[in-house]
Image (cartoon, rainbow, N blue to C red):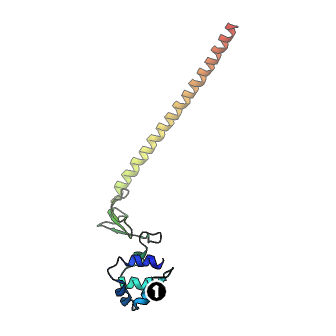
Amino acid sequence: MTGEELKYILAHTRLQFKDLAAELEMSQQNFSKALKVSDIKTGFLEKLCDVLNVSMDFFYKGTKYASTSVQVTASGNQSIATNSGDVTVGAQNENSGHIGTQNNYSYPDAQQKQDNVTTLTETVSTLTRELETSQQQKSDLIDVVATSQKQIQQLTNMVDRLTQ
């Protein structure tokens, strides 16, 4: 970050440059010199963070150096890992939000779990039988097509002999 870039950012704070210099325990002249460099030192930015009560992200908003960390908080009467609850997602950028969750794969008692397993097992069994039936029908159709092709070939041969 250049001194000019930092100067632009600081111009939008609640303090004037002379007040910032005083808070940093610097003369106005030294503060002005610090803003004329081509590469601002991290230590200087850290001191500014303390004075302005901001994080380093304050200086890098809107740049590729801005923080992309996300904080996820889960809450609710029940654990969302086992049933339901709320998830709040907060980030330093504009993508903060709140998501309600419901875990549909958790059941409160063993009987419900067993019923679900039984239903799924029966469904798989039914679908397997239907697939076998479909495969048999497919084989039968292939045989019909093959027989039809043989008959067409025989008829074509007969027509060729008759027309000669």
Q: Residue tagged by mark 1?
A: 33
What is the x, y in percent for residue 58? 39, 76
Residue at left 34%, top 64%? Answer: 97
Q: Quadrant of residue 96?
A: bottom left
Is residue 37 positioned above or below 119 on the image? Answer: below
Expressed as whole percent of the image width and height from the top left, the position of residue 26 reads 41, 91
Residue at 65%, 16% (x, y): give it. Answer: 154
Residue 88: where, in percent of width, then height?
34, 66
For this view, does 74 lie left or right of residue 152? left
**Residue 59 occupies which quadrant of the picture?**
bottom left
Side of 14 where 136 appears, left or right: right
Q: Residue furthest left?
A: 77
Q: Residues within 10 Å of mark 1 (few under 14, many from 20)?
A: few
| Left or right, residue 52 beside residue 135 | left
Q: Is residue 122 above or below residue 135?
A: below
Question: Looking at the picture, how far across and down is residue 117, in whole percent?
Answer: 40, 51
* Callout count: 1
Closer to the camera in the image, 38 or 124:
38
State the SS at label 1: helix
Residue at (53% x, 31% y) in the render: 138
**Which residue sits at x=45%, y=77%?**
4
- Of residues 110 and 10, the one nearer the viewer is 10
